[in-house]
Image (cartoon, rainbow, N blue to C red):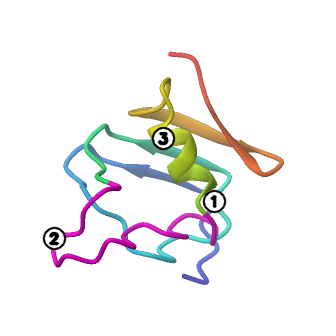
Amino acid sequence: MGNKITSVVIPDSVTTIESNAFTGLQKITVGGNLNFDSHPQGNHSLLNNSINGNNAFRNAYTAGNGGAGTYILVGEIWVKQSS
């Protein structure tokens, strides 16, 4: 939180990203193993506000055409890039 990172690559081995992990991202490349439904410690608010302080990335990632890939922030919406 509070970093100046604007782009990040998260490998497929990562399954969780804690709340407020990244702020200011404009681009994210992520594997397909993120789990937004359960936390290893039972905290069901896992990943709330994890990217840029809101759930816009989570919503894009879990959408029907989401999942692994590269996303670019356009305004306030994360757009998955074509392969």
Say which element carries label 1: loop
9 lies left or right of 76: left
Furthest-right residue in this view: 75
Give how far across and how far down residue 17 sits, in percent: 36, 65
Give the image location of residue 11, x and y in percent: 29, 47
Name the residue tied to disc 2: 40
Name the residue rendered at 36%, 70% in the picture: 46
From the top left corner, tell me how far across and down residue 47 is, in percent: 42, 66
Q: Give the image location of residue 55, x and y in percent.
A: 58, 60
Mark linked to residue 61: 3
- Residue range in magenta is 36-54
Image quarter of the N terminus:
bottom right
Task: Name the kind of residue labelled 2 in the image.
Answer: Pro
Q: Earlier in the sequence, mark 1 or mark 3?
A: 1
Q: How far apart are marks 2 and 1 (CA)?
A: 25 Å
In the structure shown, which secondary structural element does the residue marked by tag 3 occupy? helix
Of mark 3 and mark 2, the one earlier in the sequence is 2
Indicate which label's residue lies in the foreground, 1 or 3. Answer: 3
Q: Quadrant of residue 39?
A: bottom left
| Nearer-the-camera pick, 83 or 62 | 62
Please give left or right for residue 37 compared with residue 72 in the image. left
Instruction: Judge the density around disc 2: few (<14), some (14-19), many (≥20) Cα neighbours within 10 Å.
Output: few
Name the kind of residue labelled 3 in the image. Tyr
CB atoms of marks 1 and 3 within 8 Å: no
In percent of the image, x 45 and y 40: which residue is there?
A: 62
Lower sequence index among marks 2 and 1: 1
Prevailing secondary structure of the magenta residues: loop
In the rendered image, the residue lying farthest to the top is: 83
Q: Residue under label 1, please give it.
A: 25
